[in-house]
Amino acid sequence: MKDPRSLIEARYGHLPFEPPAEVPEALAALLDRRVTRRFKPDAIPEPLLNIVLAAAQSAPSKSDMQQYSIVVLEDAKRIAAIADWIGTMPWIKDAPVLLIFCADIRRNREICERAGLEHANDNLDTLLNATVDGALALGMCVAAADAAGLGTCPISYVRNHMEKVAPLLSLPKGVFPIAGLSLGWPAARNEPSARLPPSVIIHRDRYSTAGEPEALAAYDARRERAKPRYPEIHGPAPEGCSWTENVARQLSVPERAGFRAWLRSRGFALD
Protein backbone atom coordinates (compact mmCIF):
# COMPACT_ATOMS: atom_id res chain seq x y z
CA MET A 1 0.00 0.00 0.00
CA LYS A 2 1.28 3.45 -0.85
CA ASP A 3 2.17 5.85 1.93
CA PRO A 4 -0.71 8.33 2.45
CA ARG A 5 1.75 11.23 2.65
CA SER A 6 3.10 10.45 -0.83
CA LEU A 7 -0.43 10.16 -2.19
CA ILE A 8 -1.43 13.55 -0.79
CA GLU A 9 1.79 15.18 -1.99
CA ALA A 10 1.18 13.81 -5.50
CA ARG A 11 -2.43 14.95 -5.48
CA TYR A 12 -1.71 18.53 -4.39
CA GLY A 13 1.90 19.03 -5.40
CA HIS A 14 2.76 19.59 -1.75
CA LEU A 15 1.51 18.45 1.66
CA PRO A 16 -1.34 20.81 2.68
CA PHE A 17 -2.24 18.69 5.72
CA GLU A 18 -0.89 15.71 7.62
CA PRO A 19 -2.86 12.61 6.57
CA PRO A 20 -3.47 9.56 8.76
CA ALA A 21 -0.61 7.09 8.96
CA GLU A 22 -2.75 4.53 7.12
CA VAL A 23 -5.80 4.70 4.89
CA PRO A 24 -8.00 1.88 3.54
CA GLU A 25 -6.81 0.44 0.24
CA ALA A 26 -9.98 1.54 -1.58
CA LEU A 27 -9.45 5.13 -0.41
CA ALA A 28 -5.80 5.05 -1.44
CA ALA A 29 -6.87 3.95 -4.92
CA LEU A 30 -9.16 6.99 -5.21
CA LEU A 31 -6.38 9.33 -4.09
CA ASP A 32 -4.09 7.76 -6.70
CA ARG A 33 -6.56 8.08 -9.59
CA ARG A 34 -4.89 8.94 -12.88
CA VAL A 35 -6.10 9.59 -16.39
CA THR A 36 -5.18 7.18 -19.20
CA ARG A 37 -4.44 8.38 -22.72
CA ARG A 38 -2.46 5.38 -23.96
CA PHE A 39 -4.38 2.13 -24.34
CA LYS A 40 -3.54 -1.42 -25.31
CA PRO A 41 -5.59 -2.88 -28.17
CA ASP A 42 -6.90 -5.75 -26.04
CA ALA A 43 -10.67 -6.09 -25.80
CA ILE A 44 -12.49 -5.88 -22.47
CA PRO A 45 -14.23 -9.20 -21.68
CA GLU A 46 -18.00 -8.74 -21.72
CA PRO A 47 -18.52 -9.99 -18.13
CA LEU A 48 -15.98 -7.46 -16.85
CA LEU A 49 -17.53 -4.64 -18.89
CA ASN A 50 -20.96 -5.54 -17.53
CA ILE A 51 -19.67 -5.46 -13.95
CA VAL A 52 -18.08 -2.02 -14.47
CA LEU A 53 -21.35 -0.74 -15.92
CA ALA A 54 -23.23 -2.23 -12.95
CA ALA A 55 -20.92 -0.25 -10.68
CA ALA A 56 -21.80 2.88 -12.66
CA GLN A 57 -25.47 2.13 -12.07
CA SER A 58 -24.72 1.80 -8.36
CA ALA A 59 -24.21 5.57 -8.14
CA PRO A 60 -26.72 7.59 -6.10
CA SER A 61 -29.60 9.10 -8.04
CA LYS A 62 -31.87 12.04 -7.29
CA SER A 63 -35.10 10.66 -5.79
CA ASP A 64 -34.17 7.26 -7.30
CA MET A 65 -35.43 8.52 -10.69
CA GLN A 66 -32.29 7.36 -12.56
CA GLN A 67 -32.52 10.03 -15.25
CA TYR A 68 -29.52 9.01 -17.33
CA SER A 69 -28.47 6.49 -19.96
CA ILE A 70 -25.11 5.10 -21.05
CA VAL A 71 -24.38 4.32 -24.70
CA VAL A 72 -21.64 1.72 -25.09
CA LEU A 73 -19.57 2.02 -28.26
CA GLU A 74 -17.32 -0.88 -29.23
CA ASP A 75 -17.49 -0.42 -32.99
CA ALA A 76 -14.12 1.03 -34.04
CA LYS A 77 -15.62 3.02 -36.92
CA ARG A 78 -18.11 4.80 -34.68
CA ILE A 79 -15.46 5.54 -32.07
CA ALA A 80 -13.14 6.84 -34.82
CA ALA A 81 -15.89 9.10 -36.17
CA ILE A 82 -16.25 10.84 -32.80
CA ALA A 83 -12.48 11.06 -32.39
CA ASP A 84 -12.14 12.60 -35.86
CA TRP A 85 -14.85 15.18 -35.13
CA ILE A 86 -13.00 16.20 -31.97
CA GLY A 87 -9.75 16.21 -33.90
CA THR A 88 -7.33 16.80 -31.02
CA MET A 89 -7.60 13.47 -29.18
CA PRO A 90 -6.47 10.71 -31.58
CA TRP A 91 -5.89 8.36 -28.65
CA ILE A 92 -9.67 7.96 -28.31
CA LYS A 93 -9.42 5.53 -31.22
CA ASP A 94 -6.98 3.33 -29.30
CA ALA A 95 -9.41 2.46 -26.49
CA PRO A 96 -11.61 -0.56 -27.25
CA VAL A 97 -14.67 1.03 -25.60
CA LEU A 98 -16.11 4.52 -25.58
CA LEU A 99 -18.95 5.17 -23.15
CA ILE A 100 -21.27 8.13 -23.70
CA PHE A 101 -23.04 9.22 -20.52
CA CYS A 102 -26.31 11.00 -21.27
CA ALA A 103 -28.86 12.98 -19.32
CA ASP A 104 -32.20 11.29 -20.05
CA ILE A 105 -35.57 12.80 -19.24
CA ARG A 106 -37.37 10.99 -22.08
CA ARG A 107 -37.86 7.78 -20.11
CA ASN A 108 -39.67 9.39 -17.19
CA ARG A 109 -41.76 11.59 -19.48
CA GLU A 110 -43.10 8.44 -21.08
CA ILE A 111 -43.61 6.80 -17.68
CA CYS A 112 -45.82 9.76 -16.72
CA GLU A 113 -47.70 9.52 -20.01
CA ARG A 114 -48.39 5.82 -19.58
CA ALA A 115 -49.62 6.53 -16.05
CA GLY A 116 -52.03 9.13 -17.41
CA LEU A 117 -50.27 11.95 -15.55
CA GLU A 118 -48.74 15.19 -16.75
CA HIS A 119 -44.97 15.56 -16.42
CA ALA A 120 -45.15 18.85 -14.48
CA ASN A 121 -41.40 19.21 -13.90
CA ASP A 122 -40.12 19.68 -17.42
CA ASN A 123 -37.79 22.47 -16.35
CA LEU A 124 -34.19 23.50 -15.73
CA ASP A 125 -34.12 21.73 -12.36
CA THR A 126 -34.95 18.41 -14.00
CA LEU A 127 -32.20 18.96 -16.56
CA LEU A 128 -29.77 19.62 -13.71
CA ASN A 129 -30.90 16.53 -11.83
CA ALA A 130 -30.49 14.36 -14.92
CA THR A 131 -27.05 15.80 -15.62
CA VAL A 132 -25.92 15.19 -12.03
CA ASP A 133 -27.28 11.63 -12.18
CA GLY A 134 -25.20 10.95 -15.28
CA ALA A 135 -22.10 12.63 -13.84
CA LEU A 136 -22.34 10.58 -10.64
CA ALA A 137 -22.60 7.40 -12.72
CA LEU A 138 -19.53 8.46 -14.72
CA GLY A 139 -17.57 9.00 -11.51
CA MET A 140 -18.52 5.59 -10.17
CA CYS A 141 -17.57 4.06 -13.51
CA VAL A 142 -14.11 5.64 -13.29
CA ALA A 143 -13.59 4.24 -9.78
CA ALA A 144 -14.82 0.79 -10.81
CA ALA A 145 -12.60 0.74 -13.89
CA ASP A 146 -9.55 1.66 -11.82
CA ALA A 147 -10.37 -1.10 -9.34
CA ALA A 148 -10.52 -3.59 -12.22
CA GLY A 149 -7.16 -2.48 -13.62
CA LEU A 150 -8.70 -0.58 -16.52
CA GLY A 151 -7.89 2.98 -17.53
CA THR A 152 -10.25 5.84 -18.31
CA CYS A 153 -10.33 9.36 -19.64
CA PRO A 154 -13.44 11.59 -19.55
CA ILE A 155 -14.19 13.55 -22.73
CA SER A 156 -16.41 16.62 -22.43
CA TYR A 157 -15.66 17.51 -26.06
CA VAL A 158 -18.49 15.26 -27.25
CA ARG A 159 -20.69 18.27 -26.45
CA ASN A 160 -18.83 20.29 -29.09
CA HIS A 161 -20.37 18.05 -31.73
CA MET A 162 -23.81 17.19 -30.35
CA GLU A 163 -25.44 17.78 -33.74
CA LYS A 164 -23.34 14.86 -35.07
CA VAL A 165 -23.06 12.68 -31.97
CA ALA A 166 -26.83 12.62 -31.32
CA PRO A 167 -27.82 11.12 -34.70
CA LEU A 168 -24.81 8.76 -34.67
CA LEU A 169 -26.13 7.32 -31.40
CA SER A 170 -29.83 7.62 -32.37
CA LEU A 171 -30.45 9.79 -29.30
CA PRO A 172 -34.17 10.69 -29.11
CA LYS A 173 -35.54 14.01 -27.92
CA GLY A 174 -35.10 14.39 -24.18
CA VAL A 175 -31.62 12.84 -24.21
CA PHE A 176 -28.31 14.67 -24.56
CA PRO A 177 -24.66 13.60 -24.17
CA ILE A 178 -22.97 14.84 -21.00
CA ALA A 179 -19.52 13.38 -21.62
CA GLY A 180 -17.70 10.44 -23.08
CA LEU A 181 -15.40 8.07 -21.23
CA SER A 182 -12.62 6.15 -22.97
CA LEU A 183 -12.25 2.72 -21.38
CA GLY A 184 -9.56 0.11 -21.90
CA TRP A 185 -6.40 -1.55 -20.66
CA PRO A 186 -3.79 1.12 -19.96
CA ALA A 187 -0.48 1.03 -21.82
CA ALA A 188 0.53 3.83 -19.47
CA ARG A 189 -1.17 6.12 -16.99
CA ASN A 190 -0.50 9.82 -16.71
CA GLU A 191 1.05 11.24 -13.58
CA PRO A 192 -1.50 12.59 -11.07
CA SER A 193 -2.69 16.11 -11.83
CA ALA A 194 -2.00 18.41 -8.89
CA ARG A 195 -5.29 19.80 -7.63
CA LEU A 196 -6.11 23.17 -6.13
CA PRO A 197 -5.26 23.36 -2.43
CA PRO A 198 -8.01 22.48 0.04
CA SER A 199 -7.99 26.10 1.27
CA VAL A 200 -9.45 27.14 -2.11
CA ILE A 201 -11.97 24.32 -2.59
CA ILE A 202 -13.00 23.34 0.95
CA HIS A 203 -15.01 25.89 2.95
CA ARG A 204 -15.59 25.36 6.68
CA ASP A 205 -18.96 26.54 8.03
CA ARG A 206 -19.23 29.38 5.49
CA TYR A 207 -17.91 30.32 2.04
CA SER A 208 -14.77 32.42 2.21
CA THR A 209 -12.32 33.82 -0.36
CA ALA A 210 -9.75 34.82 2.27
CA GLY A 211 -6.24 34.12 1.05
CA GLU A 212 -7.41 32.84 -2.32
CA PRO A 213 -5.20 35.03 -4.57
CA GLU A 214 -2.10 34.00 -2.62
CA ALA A 215 -3.11 30.33 -2.68
CA LEU A 216 -3.69 30.44 -6.45
CA ALA A 217 -0.32 32.10 -7.01
CA ALA A 218 1.38 29.37 -4.99
CA TYR A 219 -0.55 26.72 -6.94
CA ASP A 220 0.60 28.22 -10.24
CA ALA A 221 4.19 28.12 -8.99
CA ARG A 222 3.93 24.42 -8.07
CA ARG A 223 2.55 23.28 -11.43
CA GLU A 224 4.56 23.05 -14.62
CA ARG A 225 3.60 25.60 -17.24
CA ALA A 226 1.33 24.04 -19.82
CA LYS A 227 0.57 24.37 -23.50
CA PRO A 228 -1.31 27.66 -24.02
CA ARG A 229 -5.03 27.53 -24.70
CA TYR A 230 -6.33 29.36 -27.78
CA PRO A 231 -2.94 30.65 -29.03
CA GLU A 232 -4.64 31.71 -32.28
CA ILE A 233 -6.74 34.20 -30.28
CA HIS A 234 -4.57 35.18 -27.30
CA GLY A 235 -1.23 34.77 -28.99
CA PRO A 236 1.52 32.20 -28.53
CA ALA A 237 3.23 31.60 -25.22
CA PRO A 238 6.46 29.70 -25.98
CA GLU A 239 7.25 29.51 -22.28
CA GLY A 240 3.86 27.93 -21.57
CA CYS A 241 1.02 29.19 -19.40
CA SER A 242 0.24 28.86 -15.73
CA TRP A 243 -3.00 27.14 -14.69
CA THR A 244 -4.79 30.43 -13.96
CA GLU A 245 -3.60 31.93 -17.24
CA ASN A 246 -5.02 29.00 -19.18
CA VAL A 247 -8.31 29.13 -17.25
CA ALA A 248 -8.66 32.80 -18.16
CA ARG A 249 -7.70 32.12 -21.78
CA GLN A 250 -10.27 29.36 -22.17
CA LEU A 251 -13.15 31.06 -20.39
CA SER A 252 -12.69 34.30 -22.34
CA VAL A 253 -13.54 32.51 -25.61
CA PRO A 254 -17.22 31.51 -26.08
CA GLU A 255 -17.59 27.74 -26.33
CA ARG A 256 -20.70 25.75 -27.29
CA ALA A 257 -22.56 29.00 -27.85
CA GLY A 258 -25.47 27.10 -29.42
CA PHE A 259 -25.89 24.67 -26.52
CA ARG A 260 -29.11 26.22 -25.17
CA ALA A 261 -30.72 26.40 -28.59
CA TRP A 262 -29.73 22.80 -29.32
CA LEU A 263 -31.21 21.60 -26.03
CA ARG A 264 -34.47 23.43 -26.76
CA SER A 265 -34.60 21.84 -30.22
CA ARG A 266 -34.22 18.45 -28.56
CA GLY A 267 -37.15 18.85 -26.20
CA PHE A 268 -35.61 20.45 -23.10
CA ALA A 269 -37.78 23.32 -21.83
CA LEU A 270 -35.11 24.98 -19.60
CA ASP A 271 -37.79 27.04 -17.82
Image: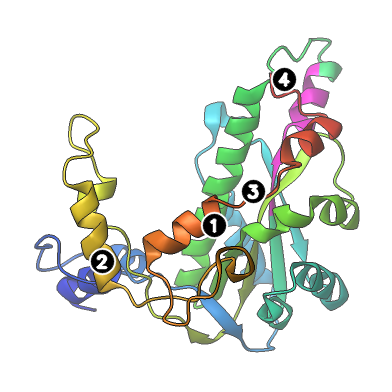
Q: Amino acid at mark 2?
A: Tyr
Q: Quadrant of residue 242?
A: bottom left
Whether residue 170 sits left or right of residue 118 in the image: it is right
Residue at (67, 75) in percent of width and height: 89
Q: Amino acid at mark 3?
A: Pro
Q: Is residue 171 visible?
A: yes
Picture disc at residue 12: 2
- Look at mark 1 in the image and give the residue it sits on: 250
Residue at (62, 72) in percent of width and height: 183
Q: Secondary structure at mark 3?
A: loop
Picture disc at residue 254: 3
Q: CA distance from mark 2 to mark 3?
A: 30 Å
Q: Secondary structure at mark 1?
A: helix
- Mark positioned earlier in the residue sequence (1 or 2): 2
- Mark positioned earlier in the residue sequence (1 or 4): 4
Q: CA distance from mark 1 to mark 3?
A: 8 Å
Q: Is residue 24 visible?
A: no
Q: Quadrant of residue 197?
A: bottom left
Q: Secondary structure at mark 4?
A: loop
Question: From what the image shows, is residue 41 above or below residue 35?
Answer: below
Picture disc at residue 122: 4
Q: CA distance from mark 3 to mark 4?
A: 27 Å
- Mark positioned earlier in the residue sequence (2 or 3): 2
Towards the viewer: 46 or 212: 212
Residue 25 picture location, percent across and down: 28, 69
Q: Which residues are magenta?
A: 101-112
Q: CA distance from mark 2 to mark 4?
A: 41 Å
Mark in the foreground, 2 or 3: 3
- Mark positioned earlier in the residue sequence (2 or 4): 2
Q: Amino acid at mark 4?
A: Asp
